[in-house]
Image (cartoon, helix red, strand yellow):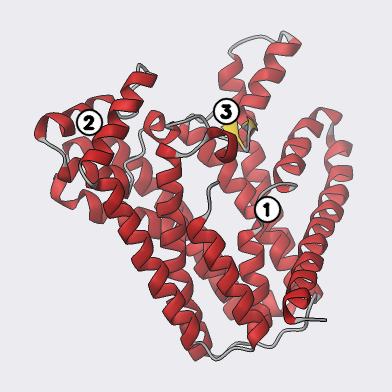
Amino acid sequence: MTGAEQLRNEQADFVASVAGELTGFLTSRQGIMSGISPDIDPIMGSISNLVTGGKRLRALMCYWGWRGAGGNAGAAEVVAAGAALELFQAAALIHDDIIDRSDTRRGGPSVHRRFSQLHEAQGWALDSGRFGQAAAILAGDLCLSFSEEAFTDIGERAASGSRARLIFNLMRAEVMAGQYLDILEEVAGPVRDRAGAVSRAQSIIRFKSAKYSTEHPLALGGALAGATNDLLRGYSAFALPLGEAFQLRDDVLGVFGDPLTTGKPAGDDLREGKRTVLVALALDQASPAESAFIDSRLGSPELDDGDVQEIRRIIEDSGALQATEVLIGEYGNAAYGALEALQLDELPKTALRRLAEATVSRAS
């Protein structure tokens, strides 16, 4: 078997094991929740639906962090960690879609929209939108609880005070902090000093996305396998800039991406009012009149397709899109350089390199 075949087979086996772990975990909890009331079944169904899709980036980063630190292929501990990360990711997506007022996720209705549709289909009383949001908040909270349960099931390696537990706890806290900074910038950004907008946007992507998408999952896998402090520092040097490139690419796709591949409407980030690095660069580099137009239209309920096209034009003509692509390249190069410096066996190093390539150049 060639190295490429071994990598492909091992990675596929792990992804399948995580899927099986999630199915088994949620099936066991389904019995408990159904015992409370069958009316809770739609919440469990929404969670199961969400964790069956996605790229498994965080779980895979965790796996190759584990393997790079000497962990055995397909071990139960790292499979459980992968499942815990996927459940946490599901919680983050559910809550993020509520905050962003996003009605779609992966080409279908978001969780809060699914519950609004259920309300409408059943002809229930009161407001369907409010019910949908409330039900989705609870579904996201339940995902957070399940994530904690799944991680605790790992056992001693994830016990209180362990390096893995500290990383897992820090990851979750940082995401919440980053999410708050994001919504704060949406409302405070227009009246704050514009000179600091790019710096604030970069801080948001670091704590809301970059660290929990790549850095913490990779370190988590390493810590579970007993990685040295030097190796964990090397993991961070690779994975943090990779996560920042990942989020910057996401920001570009949120404005310029093809809905058929992103699963989101064109210009969705503009409708949600996201003040990303891409937007911050445009506000800084565009003419005063163009910057004022972006400020007045970003996140507006009246934002139409013509406004989206105009903001896209301003972003391109101002050089903000090109500057963002340059940043993505710089972060990517930093990640690749740090990866080459890591003292890893060829299999995990190759796997991490391929994950990095897919992350930086992705179209969805």
Q: Is 227 drawn above or below residue 217 in the view shown?
A: below
Q: Earlier in the sequence, mark 1 or mark 3?
A: 1
- The residue at which mark 3 appears reads as 133
C-alpha span from label 2 to label 1: 36 Å
Counting from the top left corner in percent of width and height, residue 211 is at 47, 64
Residue type highlighted by circle 3 = Gln
Which image quadrant for residue 346?
bottom right
Evaluate if marks 2 and 3 touch, with contact meaning CB atoms under 8 Å apart: no
Evaluate if marks 2 and 1 touch, with contact meaning CB atoms under 8 Å apart: no
Q: Quadrant of the N terminus?
A: bottom right
Residue 161 visible from this viewpoint: no
Please tell me whether mark 1 sits on a helix, a strand or a loop. Answer: helix
Q: Earlier in the sequence, mark 2 or mark 1?
A: 1
Left or right for 107, reference 44: left
C-alpha span from label 1 to label 3: 19 Å
Q: Nearer the viewer, mark 2 or mark 1?
A: 2
Q: Is 224 drawn above or below residue 59 in the view shown?
A: below
Residue most extreme to the front: 2
Counting from the top left corner in percent of width and height, residue 20 is at 84, 57
Residue drawn at (37%, 45%) of the image: 182
